Amino acid sequence: MNERLFGTDGIRGLANVHPMTAEMALQVGRAAGHLFRNGDRPHTILIGKDTRRSCYMLENALTAGLCSMGIRVLLTGPLPTPGVSYIMRSLRCDGAVMISASHNGYADNGIKIFGADGFKIPDQTEDRIAQWITDGELDNIRPTGDRVGTARRIDDAVGRYIEFAKASFPKGMRLDGLRIVVDCANGAAYKAGPNALSELGADVIAIGNQPNGMNINDNIGSVHPEEMRATVIREKADVGIAFDGDGDRIVMADEKGRPLDGNAILALLGLDMLERGALPHSTLVANIMANGGLERTMAPAGGAVLRTNVGDRYVVEAMRDKGLTLGGEPSGHIVLLEHNTTGDALIAALQVLATAIRRDQPLSALAAAYQEMPECHRKVAFENGAQIPDDLLEALGGEAEAEIQGRGRIVLRRSGTEKIIRVMVQHEEPRKAKLVAGELARRVEAAVRKA
């Protein structure tokens, strides 16, 4: 393999085309089985999935690979990624695999692997799996007879996750009187999201809750929240919630239909936790693409923001390393380590709702505390795989930094999933952000042409 098998969030690609084929899924299953074996005791791995048609193909291939290595397999059916992480810990599994391409369209799919602690396995472990597959090291490991693995379905996986999510909501608090629009993206949260909120007393209006295998994220969900926002206005709802396809991202809307992205949700939760003395070291974690408004919002209240590389796994790694409990990304990955080990859109929604109830304020009033910094984004595509040296990128970014004179932020980075360089400029003045972003993008384009 010339390119790394695993990307920033597991293996991902067009389903039934390399690397997202049944053959590769079988090999990944075998390698994962080998990874999690420890001695002669029985080993169990949980497999969850979203609602894509290709999940059937990949689920069966992964199951075959795991069983061929002597692993007992538990199948949850469609379940949000955070639900898979929770149930594998609850059942004391040795690991878990989630089949999903998150916010991508239905034709794509992906595989991400979790360790026994419920966290995504690190880059080095992913590389070991890829190496085993490439080298054929596992070809001669063939358990036989009663040492071949088995597979069975868990009938109550969604119900277990609903109860887990509800347990994160403050005792004695209910959602009575709240009218909530829930957009499930026709994805993995299509049952858990509406049911959990309804059981807590909310009047729920569910959309995007009719998956057919091909409509996941189809102009709906957290990447396309327009329908959710329009429904909030039309139905005179108090809150809107939009999940992505695997239920680990969230975007919200206030009672006026105005959007709250991951930045706003982080700021809202961060301020509340800070004021309650529930934010360790008075610090939250966000990636480098998160808005500078986080610092502008947290600093006056005595809070701080720790920055990481892009990718929710890096946010989580920093949180664990520094003993922090709140982190996230602008896309809506919100991680609350007090409750779960990965981004959990349903639990994040419940914590925002709890904050609104505690303060007896509508979501619009809570969101008003977030001081967003104007930002502008540009993309520069590679031509024929051309690359710019890192030192040149740093120099171009440094020149732009000098232009904004400490009144904003510059991020210049290669995408981890596309052949593009991302340009982001944040500045106190919207016009300045646009001007600097445009000029920086032109300089990067010129450098790409020369590369």
Image (cartoon, rainbow, N blue to C red):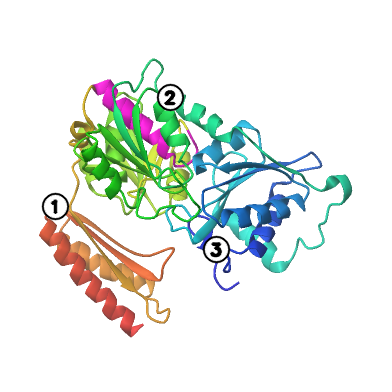
Quadrant in the picture for the N terminus: bottom right
Q: Amino acid at mark 2?
A: Glu
Q: Mostly what secondary structure, the magenta segment?
A: helix
Q: Is residue 37 above or below residue 57?
A: above
Residue 296 in the figure: left or right of residue 278: left
Q: Secondary structure at mark 3?
A: loop
Q: Secondary structure at mark 2?
A: helix
Q: Amino acid at mark 1?
A: Glu
Label 2 CA crowd tier, 10 Å (few <14, some 14–19, many 20+): some
Which stretch did the figure color magenta? 340-359
Instruction: Please tell me whether residue 345 belongs to the stretch shown in magenta.
Output: yes
Mark in front: 2 vs 1? 2
Residue for badge 1: 428
Residue 214: percent from left, percent from top: 47, 56
SS assignment at label 1: loop
So how many labels did they put on this image? Answer: 3
Q: Taking the image as drawn, is residue 220 in sight?
A: yes
Q: Do residues under tags 2 and 1 come within 8 Å of each other at their CB atoms?
A: no
The picture places residue 421, in percent across and down from the top left corner, at 34, 68
Residue 325 appears in the rendering: no
Tag 1 near tag 3, CB within 8 Å: no
Residue bearing mark 2: 199
In the image, what residue type sits under mark 3?
Answer: Ala
Instruction: Mark 2 or mark 3: name the one nearer the start of the chain.
Output: 3
